[in-house]
Image (cartoon, helix red, strand yellow):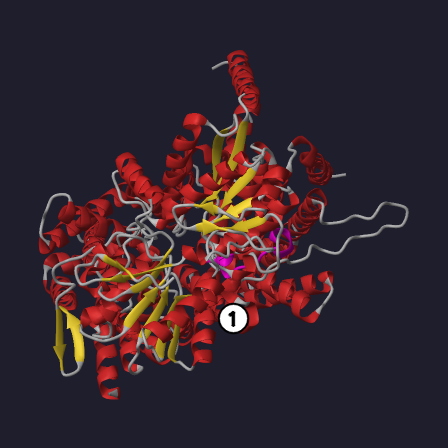
């Protein structure tokens, strides 16, 4: 096309964007930024987060909140510090959100925290477990999921007391979250009097777990095997441990302990090997609360799949924002302040009350499930 | 004055104007492309330009296929950062140490592999990059491994008497520092390439056997080229760390080597200016294509493949063709 | 107890090693005739794995047939990459350009697969991967048996092909001296195409066998390709016996390093070995060919 028509198109595009922007402002919108991994190995996190958010936005925007609608714009943070930093900057420069959701991976979250703090925009996180995210006390970062210390201490204590475990083998991925979680378990378990007979960390690129399972088998009788790894590797580990005859599902006696990384639906993929697996779930789909049942029903209707904890967390993040807006939040600063005062919010994953470090301290977000031989869940009700 | 001397002086002054123009462009860019996001992009471009220049020297001028540039990048970053955070060594001292360490590693690798040709050297350099990455990842007590090193401080502010203090917390100032350094490296490499040393390297690249018959110690020169290219890569790393503020080993995975290679090839290896534009183009292309979502990296790979298939001289070649078309002049071989 | 552990890790190492051999064989064959490296080789492996997966899950095929499907898909990919990349670039005589082009292809394939198949790991189950045999304190799955059986058969067939058939000898002739082979009435282009197709078929097949063992995502290939390169060098570029030996060696290194040290050290050990080989014996473990200018 010739130069004149090109200019015309650009002018039109510019006017449309500008016009749309001002139209938005008149409609009273709360702008939400979504920093999630859309590419790379963490991309299935992003895909599931989007689903949960979509469902929540649909519900909230039906009636709006206090005259406000919620809108979201996503940027791909790729589960890695540099892309996440760039995505955060782009989001802040172009979209100027009032509140940001993200990231999933601890490393990426740690990288974007200083950026959002400098921009004085609150960040709500529901995916990263590293203690470093709330420990130093960042006034602009809020985490609704229990951190690695809360989870680790609890599961180690429950294992010792409720499962009578005295020996453990640690299996974890060599990342902030994996190493952090394993360390907390080890410290707590040993303080109670338990013994860690093997401590095996591995990279995300390790594929074959038969050798690792052999090593575990050779380490002695393990009562529990806390496992901190993502879905793909987790699947292989469980199967390998069964093949090696270590875990219950393979004829052994060890019980694998898992946390929130394992998605709902893991059992169906792992098969018999997953029998006896005990894990913390952030979202209990068998929860009988009205809110949860509705969520599951609506999610299934919209996406034709059962919701995972990722969907649920994302859903809760939007609901929390809606709650904050209801309580008077309307821009970055007021949203931040209102968030900090949250004491009685209830979501599908559990309740939210932030401590002085903006960490949610409610333990009812930690649910324990045990996998039965028929691969369904038995809620252990330890909390 | 002889004709040749006139031409040489003409080219020399044209070169000086070109450098001036480049410096001016660098000065003006942050005010044309404003906002935190663009300033970050520009700085990433500058760092990539450095990486590409380093690799280009090894690959385009000495003819060595180095797939290990990511290792020198990472070594520069980690050595300088650890010296700063663990031993309290001032920034520029650590910078020099990082560059030196990377350069020496390049020399070390070259000594190992330089007698091997082509693909052997490529794989050896790849192997070196894998080892470096794994060491950075696993030696947790030294490097923190995947836990990462956080809150890396920017270079210390510069106080010039009579002027306000220049703080490198300002992203524009940091960009100027890195881009300025890249320009400096470019000028130095340009001098090197047009000196007798450059001719020697070209002779080795074109025909090693004949060069040897002229008494040139090819191995020694290749080691030299590797050292320089690696040192430049290390410098890029020393800037990367304070720029991003966070250091994790995965930033230096081997795929980074491939990206840098692509920048050099797309730009046009064997020229110095080509890789500069190759780096800028390939840095900005994924950002500009973000709207396409998942497919942007596919487009990136497609661009690379197509360039290699249809325009192997890269942007430099394209530029020569365009210029020839416009001026009607015959296209020179180089 | 220790003897059992050693025996078990030896089994694990051999199973893994056989898979690596299949992947590396393709690379080394291509290098032998073309003196080129196909960086996208590992992505052929991944693509073959996905082809097998969808054959089983969408079309309801059985596992053993899916191996054949993966083989065919690999062959097709090989034919395509020769047509679009290797053949056109051949007369340009550059060592590096085809390699770079295949890096581009690798990027396209990985991210294309990501966009198409999504990032969620696929659970590739076969009836054989769940069937466990326990013998004298060790364990192995039916899948491992299949891997070893198919690998051994393939290697034996390949070996026989190279040594005893006319086509095989022609291939070796082209590998040794392309010009002279051409003068002898052998069509090098045709043979090169054949080699690439064969090698890529091997890659695809390896994918179908690897997928139940590894984690199946579009990035599965990256984890394997780097070791494959190491194997090719340790074994000697273009050298079939060397590659087999090196592949098994690397598999064993992997399992024993995991047992007695740390899984994170595997790559370091393998590549340190690689660099040592390059320094002291660049032609590889078994040098049968005389490299011109190693």
**Residue C158 or residue A41, whichever sits in front:** A41
Quarter of the view holding residue C208: bottom left
Q: Main secondary structure of the magenta part?
A: helix
Q: Position of residue A325 (x, y in %)?
A: 54, 35
Quick one: C157 or C205, which is closer to the camera? Answer: C205
Q: Can residue B197 be seen in this view?
A: yes
Q: Determine which quarter of the picture holds residue C264.
A: bottom left
Q: Residue C177's image quarter?
A: bottom left
Rendering coords of residue B274 (x, y %): 55, 41
Where is residue B270 drawn, in percent x and y?
53, 47
- The quadrant of the image that shows the N terminus of chain B is top right
As drawn, B132 above or below B67:
below
Query: On the picture, is A54 further left or further right than B143?
Result: left
Q: Does C287 sit above or below residue B259? A: below
Name the residue rendered at 70%, 46% in the picture.
B180
The quadrant the C terminus of chain B occupies is top right
Q: Can residue B302 be seen in this view?
A: no
> For the residue labelled by badge 1, is the local secondary structure a helix, a strand or a loop?
helix
**Front in this rendered view, residue B80 or C290:** B80
Q: Which of A244 and B3 is in front in this view?
A: A244
Protein chain holding label 1: B
Q: Establish if B278 lies above or below A139.
A: above
Residue A352, image x and y in percent?
A: 48, 50
Q: What stretch is highlighted in magenta?
A: B241-253
Q: A327 left or right of B84? A: left
The local crowd at label 1, few if under 14, some if 14 to 19, many if 20 or more residues have their Cα within 10 Å, is: some
Question: Which residue is tagged 1?
Answer: B140
Find out whether residue B194 is within the magenta segment: no
Vertical arrangement, residue A29 with respect to residue B101, above or below: above
- Report how many numbered discs are placed on residues in the image: 1
């Amino acid at each position: 096309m010739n130069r004149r028509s090109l200019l015309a198109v650009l002018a039109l595009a510019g006017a449309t964007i500008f016009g749309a922007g001002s139209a938005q402002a008149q409609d009273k919108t709360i702008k939400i930024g979504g920093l999630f991994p859309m590419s790379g190995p963490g991309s299935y996190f992003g895909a599931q987060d989007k689903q949960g958010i979509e469902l929540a936005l649909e519900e909230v925007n039906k009636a709006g909140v206090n005259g406000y609608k919620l809108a979201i714009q996503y940027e791909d943070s790729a589960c890695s510090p540099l892309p996440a930093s760039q995505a955060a900057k782009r989001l802040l420069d172009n979209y100027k959100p009032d509140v940001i959701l993200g990231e999933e991976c601890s490393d990426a979250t740690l990288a974007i925290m200083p950026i959002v703090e400098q921009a004085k925009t609150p960040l709500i996180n529901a995916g990263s477990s590293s203690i470093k995210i709330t420990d130093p006390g960042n006034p602009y970062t809020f985490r609704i999921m229990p951190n690695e210390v809360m989870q680790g201490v609890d599961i180690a204590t429950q294992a010792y007391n409720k499962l009578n475990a005295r020996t453990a083998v640690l299996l974890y991925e060599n990342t902030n979250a994996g190493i952090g979680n394993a360390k907390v378990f080890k410290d707590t378990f040993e303080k109670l009097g338990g013994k860690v007979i093997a401590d095996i960390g591995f990279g995300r690129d390790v594929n074959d777990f038969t050798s690792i399972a052999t090593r575990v088998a050779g380490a002695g009788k393990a009562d529990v095997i806390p496992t901190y790894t993502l879905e793909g590797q987790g699947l292989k580990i469980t199967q390998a441990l069964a093949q090696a005859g270590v875990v219950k599902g393979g004829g052994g006696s060890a019980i694998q302990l898992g946390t929130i990384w394992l998605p709902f639906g893991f059992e169906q993929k792992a098969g018999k090997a997953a029998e006896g697996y005990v894990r913390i779930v952030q979202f209990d789909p068998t929860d009988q609360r009205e809110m949860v049942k509705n969520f599951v029903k609506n999610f299934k209707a919209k996406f034709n799949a059962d919701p995972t904890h990722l969907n649920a967390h994302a859903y809760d993040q939007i609901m929390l924002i809606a709650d904050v807006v209801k309580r008077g939040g309307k821009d970055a600063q007021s949203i931040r302040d209102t968030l900090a005062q949250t004491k009685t919010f209830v979501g599908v994953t559990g309740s939210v009350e932030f401590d002085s470090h903006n960490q949610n301290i409610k333990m009812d977000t930690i649910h324990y499930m045990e996998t039965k031989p028929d691969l369904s869940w038995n809620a252990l009700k330890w909390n | 004055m002889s004709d040749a001397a006139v031409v040489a002086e003409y080219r020399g002054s044209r070169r000086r104007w070109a450098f001036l123009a480049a410096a001016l462009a660098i000065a003006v860019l942050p005010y044309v492309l404003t906002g935190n996001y663009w300033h970050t992009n520009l700085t990433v471009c500058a760092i990539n330009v450095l990486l590409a220049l380093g690799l280009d020297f090894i690959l385009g001028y000495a003819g060595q296929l180095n797939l290990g540039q990511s290792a020198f990048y990472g070594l520069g970053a980690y050595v300088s950062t650890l010296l700063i955070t663990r031993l309290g060594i001032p920034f520029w001292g650590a910078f020099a140490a990082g560059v030196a360490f990377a350069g020496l590693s390049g020399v070390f690798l070259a000594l190992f592999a330089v007698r091997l040709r082509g693909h052997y050297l490529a794989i050896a350099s790849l192997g070196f990059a894998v080892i470096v990455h794994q060491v950075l990842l696993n030696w947790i007590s030294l490097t923190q491994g995947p836990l990462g090193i956080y809150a890396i401080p920017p270079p210390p502010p510069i106080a010039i008497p009579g002027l306000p203090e220049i703080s490198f917390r300002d992203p524009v100032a940091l960009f100027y520092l890195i881009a300025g350094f890249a320009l400096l490296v470019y000028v130095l490499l340009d001098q090197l390439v047009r000196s007798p040393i450059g001719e020697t390297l070209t002779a080795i690249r074109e025909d090693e056997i004949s060069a040897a018959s002229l008494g040139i110690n090819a191995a020694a020169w290749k080691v030299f080229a590797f050292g320089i290219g690696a040192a430049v890569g290390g410098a890029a790393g020393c800037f990367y760390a304070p720029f991003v503020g966070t250091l994790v080993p995965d930033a230096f995975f081997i795929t980074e080597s491939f990206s840098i290679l692509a920048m050099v090839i797309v730009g046009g290896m064997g020229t110095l200016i080509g890789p500069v534009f190759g780096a800028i183009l390939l840095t900005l292309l994924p950002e500009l294509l973000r709207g396409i979502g998942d497919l942007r990296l596919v487009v990136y790979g497609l661009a690379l493949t197509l360039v290699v298939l249809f325009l192997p001289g890269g942007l430099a070649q394209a530029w020569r063709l365009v210029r020839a078309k416009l001026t009607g002049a015959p296209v020179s071989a180089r | 107890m220790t003897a059992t552990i050693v025996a078990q890790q030896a089994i694990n190492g051999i199973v893994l090693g056989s898979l690596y051999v299949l992947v590396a064989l393709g690379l080394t064959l291509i290098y032998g005739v073309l003196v080129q490296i196909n960086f996208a080789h590992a992505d052929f492996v991944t693509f073959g794995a996905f082809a097998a997966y969808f054959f089983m899950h969408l079309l309801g095929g059985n596992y053993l047939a899916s191996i054949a499907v993966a083989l065919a898909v690999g062959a097709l990919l090989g034919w395509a990459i020769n047509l679009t990349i290797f053949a056109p670039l051949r007369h340009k005589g550059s060592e590096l350009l085809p390699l770079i082009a295949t890096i581009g292809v690798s990027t396209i394939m990985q991210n294309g697969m990501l966009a198409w198949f999504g990032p969620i790991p696929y659970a590739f189950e076969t009836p054989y991967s769940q069937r466990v045999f326990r013998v004298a304190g060790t364990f192995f799955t039916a899948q491992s048996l299949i891997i070893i059986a198919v690998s051994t058969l393939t290697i034996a067939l390949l070996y026989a092909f190279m040594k005893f058939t006319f086509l095989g000898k022609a291939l070796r002739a082209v590998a040794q001296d392309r010009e002279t082979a051409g003068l002898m009435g052998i069509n090098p282009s045709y043979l090169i195409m054949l080699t690439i197709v064969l090698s890529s078929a091997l890659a695809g097949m390896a994918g179908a066998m690897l997928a139940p063992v590894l984690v199946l995502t579009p990035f599965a290939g990256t984890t394997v390709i780097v070791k494959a390169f190491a194997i090719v060098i340790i074994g000697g570029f273009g050298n079939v016996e060397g590659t087999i030996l090196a592949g098994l060696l690397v598999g064993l290194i992997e399992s024993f390093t995991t047992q007695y040290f740390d899984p994170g050290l595997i790559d370091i050990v393998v590549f340190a070995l690689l660099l040592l080989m390059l320094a002291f014996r660049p032609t590889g473990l078994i040098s049968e060919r005389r490299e011109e200018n190693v």
